[in-house]
Amino acid sequence: MDDTFIVTGDFDIILKVRFPEFWTLQEFLVDELSKVPGVRSIKTMMVLTTMKDQGKIMME
């Protein structure tokens, strides 16, 4: 888990996580995150292109 944000709006918490393969993301969602007490729903977004990461510009 790279970052965790407590937010307002439609979501309560946003987790920034990175996985080398899709199946490891699926494993995390099904086997770990969905079993955390209090987690009622999960929404997933995948990054298509990174423009800036941790203050470093990735594309010029």
Image: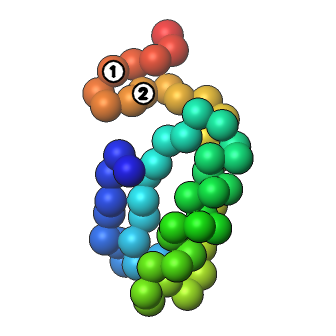
Q: Residue at x 69, y 43 (%)?
A: 22
Which label sits on residue 44?
Answer: none
Q: Residue at x 56, y 76 (%)?
A: 34
Q: Secondary structure at mark 2?
A: strand
Residue under label 1, please give it.
56
Q: Is mark 1 in CB contact (under 8 Å) with mark 2?
A: yes
Is residue 8 at all visible to an observer of this figure?
Answer: yes
Q: Which quadrant of the view contains residue 30?
A: bottom right
Q: Most extreme residue toward the top, as rendered?
A: 60
Horizontal and vertical percent for residue 36? 45, 79
Left or right: where does residue 35 sit relative to residue 7? right
Q: Amino acid at mark 2?
A: Lys
Could you classify mark 2 by the number of other residues whose Cα lies within 10 Å: few (under 14), some (14-19), or many (20 or more)? Answer: few
Residue under label 2, please give it.
52
Could you classify mark 1 by the number of other residues whose Cα lies within 10 Å: few (under 14), some (14-19), or many (20 or more)? Answer: few
Horizontal and vertical percent for residue 1? 38, 50
Q: Which quadrant of the view contains residue 15?
A: bottom left
Q: Secondary structure at mark 1?
A: strand
Residue 18 or residue 35, whichever sits in front:
35
Q: How many marks?
A: 2
Q: Amino acid at mark 1?
A: Lys
